[in-house]
Image (cartoon, rainbow, N blue to C red):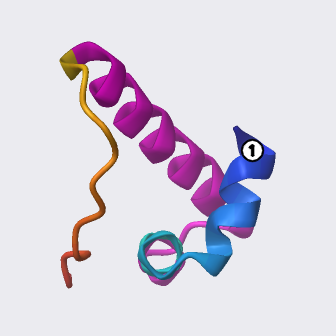
Amino acid sequence: MFPSAFAALHVPASRTYYDRCRTRGRTHTQALLRLARQRINVLFAMLRDGTFYEPRTPRLA
């Protein structure tokens, strides 16, 4: 999932989450790992609920 998170930095919603982690003092690697974990959580919820991915607008902090 780490390479997937790295590639996802080109997606605006993922980049927003990554940048928010960076502004909160996380290192590059820590922010990428948090992004990877977030993506895992979304995939798990999709499998659990039997739904398809529906992007949403990111929350502003």
How far across and down, in percent of the image, does residue 55 sit?
30, 62
Magenta segment includes 45: yes
Question: Taking 32 as reference, is 25 left or right?
Answer: left
Image quarter where the N terminus lies is top right
Which residue type carries mark 1? Phe
Q: Which residue is mark 1?
A: 2
Residue under the image location 41 percent in, 74 percent down: 13
Quarter of the figure with residue 10: bottom right
Circle 1: element type: helix
Q: Image height check: is 44 above or below 42?
A: above
How far across and down, in percent of the image, does residue 8 sit?
64, 64
Q: Image height check: is 13 above or below 51?
A: below
Q: Nearer the viewer, residue 61 or 54?
A: 54
How far across and down, in percent of the image, does residue 4 sit?
72, 49
Q: Nearer the viewer, residue 55 or 2?
A: 55
**Span highlighted in magenta in the image:** 19-48
Image quarter where the C terminus lies is bottom left
